[in-house]
Every structure is written in structure tokens, then in C-alpha cells.
Amino acid sequence: MSELAPVAVNLLGVVGHPGFGDSPYRVDADGRPYVPAGDGGIVLGLALGDSAFAVAADHAAPGACLTHPDEAARHALVLYACVGNQVRVTTGPAAGASGAVLGKRGEHSQVITVFAEADLARLRPGDEVSVRTCGQGHRPAWLPPGVTALNAAPGLFGALPVTVPRAGQPAAEVVVRAVLPARLAGNGLGRPAAGWDLDVQAGPGGPGGPGAAGELRLGDLVAVADIDARWNMGYRRGWMSVGVVGHGASPLPGHGPGVTLLLTGPAAELGVREDQAGPPAISAALLQLQ
């Protein structure tokens, strides 16, 4: 089947503001209350390449989270936005600054965007951002028949450590920071992968203790075994899903670093190889931040 050209759609995102209900506290896995700093809004001092456990925060993303006041438009923004899509600030002190989509925060229907630090510091909640969405539903011609791509801008895989299948080699191969077991999959299970990230319940140093799976960093590619993410994410033995770490850890039980999934398919067609020493696959340079 020939590769069909994807369509681009310009959408409006609004820089979000952290919000609380009637209590300032959440409760961690050990029953201790805490104030969830860093969940949504504009997070400063955190960058691509930093450890997902670098700061005392909750779901902190290295940039600005976009939302929309209209619920239907907000859902469209999150569903259409793809990792690598370009964004431009159109109002406020940072007007004219450009950035890129890093991932999604499904819990509150937000798009995670990254900017150069100086531009990020000028952003304010309520600033409007134009998002050139493109890529959802696109199927690169090189994909093995059983593998599905999602949440990825056209051309993104060409900049990532992905080896396309060759004659006599039916599987694509992706170099990842770590391969995590399905038992670590948390918040996001049962949700649509096109609009929701998958939290992995991994701690500092990797599951099982320091060094067990390397130190997950923002921008890393990771694989989660036995997870089928073609539609609603769920357990499927013999499957593999690969995505990018878009936000940091959380003290909440069932939560952790958030992975926006990019590829999913049978492990026989989607191979992965761990590299705990290499740089994060998605960097500021790759996203062409100013």
C-alpha cells in the first residue's frame, strides 16, 4: 500500500494554569498528604534530558501545558497534536516564540509543549498558541503490516533511532532507554492512546532498584512490553509499545513518568534494543527550539 500524505490542521491552544479543588493536598502511596506542585501550567527550570525524578513535583513537564476553554475543542487539540508538531505563541510577552509538541497529559486533556528557556520564562497563563497539528492517522510506508504509528509528526521517525525493516528482516527495531514490564503500566490503561499518555510506575534508578533499567530522562524513548495501544491501551501478551517520556514522576499510587506512545505492534514485528548510556532520543536540537 502506498503512503498517503497526511493533512495539517491549525488549532488554538491556551497556556494553562494549575488548578486545585477544595483541598490543596493529594495523598501519596504511603498515605502522606502533599501539595502537587508542577502539575500543569508553565514549569521553569526543567528541561529535556533531565531525570524524570529530578524535582520534587507531581507530573512536571519541561515546558508549558496547553488546554482550551471549550471541552470539545480541547479534546480535538489533544487528539490531533503529535510529537514534533511545531507551535508558535501568538499573544502576550512571548508572542512570536516557536516551540514544539513533546507529548500529552491525558488526565486533564493537555498538550505538553517545549520552548527555549528564555521564551518559556516570558509565557503567561492565558497566552494563545497556534499548533500546526499533523500526523495522526499517518502510516509510514516502511511500517511492518502489524505495527501502528500514532501521535508522531511526519518525518519524526527519521530523526529517531529506528531501523526500518530490510529484506529478510520483517521487524523494525527501536533503540530505547529501557524495556518495562506491563505490570508497571499505570494511569492511562483503558484510555485511548491517541489522546492519553501512559504513566509507568517506575522509581529513581529504574524498577527494581538503582540501575535496573537506567535513569529515565525527559525525552527518552521507552518500551512497555505486553501493551497494545492501537486503540484503548490494554494488556496483550506478545505485544510491544514504544513512546517518549513527556513528564516526570508522581507520588500518586498508579502514576509516574508519562509516556506518549508512538508505535505499537506485535513484538515479532516491533523489536526493541536497550541502550542505558545514550542521550535522550528527543532533544531540544531535534525539535529545533530557538
Image: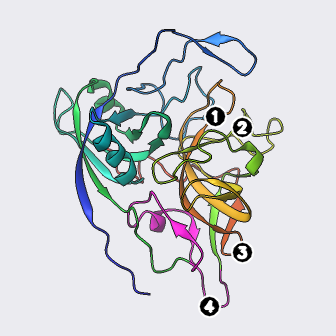
Predominant SS along the magenta part:
loop
Mark 1 surroundings within 10 Å by alpha-carbon count, few (fewer than 14), some (14 through 19), many (20 or more): many
For mark 2, does the 10 Å Cα neighbourhood hold few (<14), some (14 to 19), or many (20 or more) residues? many
Question: Residue 107 at x, y = what percent?
Answer: 50, 35
Q: Are marks 2 and 1 in contact (CB under 8 Å)?
A: yes
Q: To which residue does mark 4 refer? A: 167
Task: Sort mark 4 into few (<14), some (14-19) or many (20+) by Cα contacts within 10 Å.
Answer: few
Residue at the image position 64 percent from the left and 10 percent from the top: 33
Sequence-wise, which precedes: disc 3 or disc 1?
Answer: 1
Which is closer to the viewer, label 4 or label 3? 3
Describe the element under mark 4 as helix, strand or loop.
loop
Q: Which residue is mark 3?
A: 268
Please state the horizontal and vertical placement of residue 171, each as a whole percent of the image. 65, 77
Question: What residue did someone put label 1 on?
Answer: 256
> Relative to residue 124, is residue 119 depicted above or below?
below
Count of marks overlaid on the render: 4
Q: Please determine whether, in this image, residue 141 is positioned above or below residue 182.
A: below
Dot 4 or dot 1: first in sequence order is: 4
- Report the side of 85 relative to 226 (left or right): left
The percent position of residue 105, horizontal first and vertical second, equals: 47, 38
Tell me the quarter of the picture where residue 69 sits: top left
Query: Does 174 appear above or below 128?
Result: below
